Amino acid sequence: MATIGDVARAAGVARSTASYALSGKRAISDEVRARVQRAARELGYTANAGARALATSQTRVIGLLAQFLPDEFAPAMLQYIQGVTESARDLGYDILLSSDPEGPAALKRITDSRMVDGVVLLNVAEDDDRLPVLRAARQPGALVGLPADCTGVDVFDLDFEESGRAMVEHLHGLGHRELILVSQPEHVVERGGAYVWRLRNAAIETAAARGLALHAVYGSSAQPEIGRELHALLDAHPEATGLLLNNEAAAAALPTVLHQRNLSAPDDLSVIGRYSDEFARTFSLPFSSIESAPDRLGRMAVRQLVRRIEKQDPEDAPHVVRFVSPELVDRGSTAAPPVGH
Amino acid sequence: MATIGDVARAAGVARSTASYALSGKRAISDEVRARVQRAARELGYTANAGARALATSQTRVIGLLAQFLPDEFAPAMLQYIQGVTESARDLGYDILLSSDPEGPAALKRITDSRMVDGVVLLNVAEDDDRLPVLRAARQPGALVGLPADCTGVDVFDLDFEESGRAMVEHLHGLGHRELILVSQPEHVVERGGAYVWRLRNAAIETAAARGLALHAVYGSSAQPEIGRELHALLDAHPEATGLLLNNEAAAAALPTVLHQRNLSAPDDLSVIGRYSDEFARTFSLPFSSIESAPDRLGRMAVRQLVRRIEKQDPEDAPHVVRFVSPELVDRGSTAAPPVGH
DNA sequence: CTGAAAGCGCTTACAG
DNA sequence: CTGAAAGCGCTTACAG
């Protein structure tokens, strides 16, 4: 493989001159630059990434710490990964993907060995054990998901509280009086998935303020359990006219459940989910939903991270905590409750 | 950050001794080794990846070239990525993930700059334009998906021909006489997705040999189009008693379509898909299917790749082309055709 | 505008 | 069993 030395020799200049001619970091005569560029092209020269990283302390690689948790819905994860990967590439960075269940150890190894210039953490828990490691690292980090303590990191998340409020307000506005909210499994909460209770508590409060009955339950994130649970819920609350889902698996299972019960939305039941439009299209889910915006969140995290890596902001620019406002995508699954309710 | 020099100084030895004590690549007295290890621990020493790569010409990183094609089913991709990522970690490698639509350019950049020791290509097309780049690279490559020309690479894929045969034989054995096969969209074929016609042609041949009628069509890979197409197909072929799906989107759409037509499998229609068990569970798909084994294929590719990287086989060990035999996972969606057919 | 040299942090022959 | 030194391939002050 050709090195910068080969290029310099072929062009008849010093290695430093070849380097500068290629990087443009100092003035070079047109003639020399052309010679160097031609030599580089002809030799098929590409800088050795390790050598460059060693010399510059920059890798142009971003670490992406994902976790494929058995109780999280994998297809939803993929969209975050896509958003991060694409925007990183647009900004000239490659992605080192780790799905190691030993998150803290993996993060420490990657940052200590300086394989990456910065790190994006997905699926961040309230008291995420990767955070102490990240704060101790010299590289900056951006999170998707809201932890209890945001010091030292940039944080991006959907506004789940506003989402819970919006769901309830929407159905209240249509005249509903009794609702069911199906959240993710309770052990997601125990593990620190704050988004579950953030939406749930806001929904409960809003329902109370509006004088609505709200049955808030946790549902499985796997089939076929969640299908059975949905049936049981609808049996238990025959007067409920609205169904809110903060649980992708429940949304995926619902069309079948409704067919089996010979119900349709919104004639018999108004339904609002919380998932991405991409998800809705992939599985033809006909329910209106709060857009979870995974690609957008991934993009925001990367953009901010790169800004820090490249120190475009002043060194001690305050860290940000940014919530994406929920947007209700109307797919026509809500209406006034059926007469008689 | 502590360097090997800091460790050596703290332990009172030369840098070379510190390096050897940590790597174990030559005999070191117990006492010195203990001193070095303690110093390394206390200083929190981790070798700089760039420096090590430069010195050893090894990165312990594997490039993963994925493509998120709009007409491929994204959730299926994720499982390959998971399989590759997990097995790489088990073998001590990290994953550099590229989803750049400019596959050949991305591959060239990653290999030329020596960011990776080897490469796994996902979603390989018949005449994949990444292959010339891969063959010119000094790093070995493993493919998931069968190209027309396999020279110089290791190849892993599901045996789609046997899959097509097995689907037809299974329904033939149950007494069916008229079948429908829904493949991926035709432009997947045009793009070089050989698995589509490999399964399809084998199914057509087998049907012909057995004297069965087989309606082989291409279906959309998106909702709601595929749902409409399934309805049209069932309208057009009312005598068909078996439905074969080499199209994940069709499988995901089918439960709703069947409900809408008030049909059930296998009483009215026998159904066999081709997707992974993971996929079936995530979406509660009740159809028997040929297991597509994405995790296993990813794992096989990585294992073989690492063997080449680490030259565990003799230098010129012949390249392998390995097909995973289709396994029919019985979910009870096939039976003898309804009487009257 | 260009060159000679130092240095990034490792590993590994070479000597002893 | 251990050390001094060279070298991996870059970039970037330092000199001119």
Image: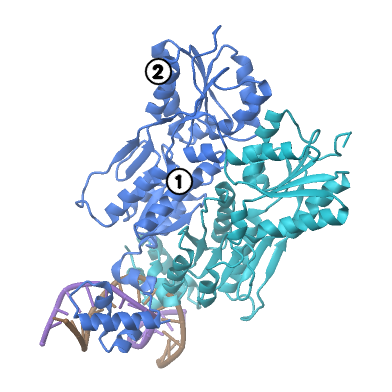
Chain colours: A cyan, B blue, C purple, D brown
Q: Residue at x 71, y 50 (%)?
A: A291
Q: Is residue B335 above or below residue B48?
A: above
Tag 1–tag 2 contact (CB < 8 Å)? no
Residue B17, percent across and down?
24, 81
Quarter of the picture containing the C terminus of chain A is: top right
A277 with respect to B193 (left or right): right
Q: Is residue A163 above or below residue B234?
A: below
Amino acid at circle 1: Tyr
Q: Residue at x 64, y 16 (%)?
A: B235
Q: Is residue B326 above or below residue A159?
A: above
Picture disc at residue A288: none
Specify the subunit that label 1 lies on.
Answer: B
Taking depth in this image into account, of A178 and A301 the one nearest to the observer is: A178
Disc 2 target residue? B206
Amino acid at circle 2: Thr
Quarter of the picture containing the N terminus of chain A is: bottom left
A76 with respect to A37 (left or right): right
Total marks in image: 2
Secondary structure category for the residue under label 2: helix
Specify the subunit that label 2 lies on.
Answer: B
Secondary structure category for the residue under label 1: helix
Residue A158 visible in image: yes
Taking depth in this image into account, of A36 and B210 the one nearest to the observer is: B210
Residue B332, percent across and down?
50, 25
Taking depth in this image into account, of A141 and A223 the one nearest to the observer is: A223
Q: Residue at x 19, y 51 (%)?
A: B314
Disc 1 target residue? B80
Mark 1 or mark 2: whose residue is earlier in sequence: 1
3D distance between C-alphas at marks 1 and 2: 30 Å
Q: Quadrant of residue A259?
A: top right
Residue A310, percent across and down?
57, 73
